[in-house]
Image: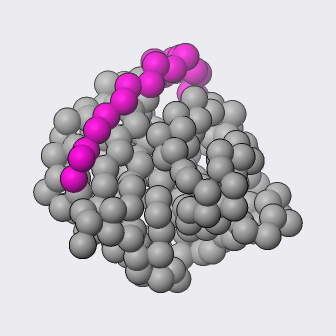
Amino acid sequence: MTPKQLAAQLRCPSGDEGALVADNMNRHNQPIIAASYQALSPSAGDHIVEVGPGTAGYLSDLMAMADDLHYTGLDQSPAMVAQAQHHHGHQEQVRFVEGDLHDPPLAPGSADHVVAINVVYFWNPLLPALAALRKLLRPGGQLCLGLRDRSSMATLPVFRHGFLTYDGPDLQQSLKTAGFVDVRQQIVPEKSINVMGQIMHKTGLVITALNPEA
């Protein structure tokens, strides 16, 4: 798979190659997924929307954090929605829906938490995407973005094909511009991995923010 082909699969996995990419993402993204889920700190009965969950390989960890959680995974990849539904659809309070962030089949203001891990790179332009995330959140609801910083991604060819990268402060400022408040950042050290024959030295970021109270 060429860097350009891999970039397309990371954006929207499909076919046999997409299934392989999704499996690799589950294995290599565990630290940033775990840190992002921990940052949510959900309470009993909360409604959580995850944007771009892929196959949601660590969903059981999230659902174990509090009683009576309700989870919706929103993904633009039909293949990922089908696989996730196959793996997790037996859970009564879990569902996966296919759709675009800018026109999701979800009720505005219905989420207590919105989490998106390693998908902010594809939101171009960024501010309309952040506005769409705010629309999903109830007043006082929490957004959590998990990502790798710019230096982690700068040297690999795959990330030169349609990825937007961030240092951390720049993304925090964009969140404030979009109307979020109480924006905070956590650094998540990660082990290096091999990507297409090149070593990727990773530093994860978990950025949280609140939708203002009405």
Out of 26 and 173, give the one closest to the viewer: 173
User: Going 65% across and 60% down the picture, which residue do you hit?
Assistant: 69
Q: Which region is colored magenta?
A: 181-202
**Predominant SS along the magenta part:** strand
Q: Give x and y (percent) for residue 153.
A: 38, 30
Out of 186 and 193, give the one closest to the viewer: 186
User: Is residue 19 shown left or right of residue 160?
Assistant: right
Q: Is residue 152 visible?
A: no
User: Going 47% across and 75% down the picture, which residue do you hit?
Assistant: 110
In which quadrant of the rendered view does residue 156 lie? top left
User: Is residue 17 shown left or right of residue 40?
Assistant: right
- Where is 133 relative to 13, above or below? below
Query: Which quadrant, please, contains the N terminus?
Result: top right
Q: Is residue 83 magenta?
A: no
User: Going 32% across and 25% down the picture, which residue do you hit?
Assistant: 151
User: Is residue 156 shown left or right of residue 130?
Assistant: right
Q: Give x and y (percent) for residue 213.
A: 26, 66
Q: Give x and y (percent) for residue 35.
A: 52, 34
Q: Is residue 111 visible?
A: yes
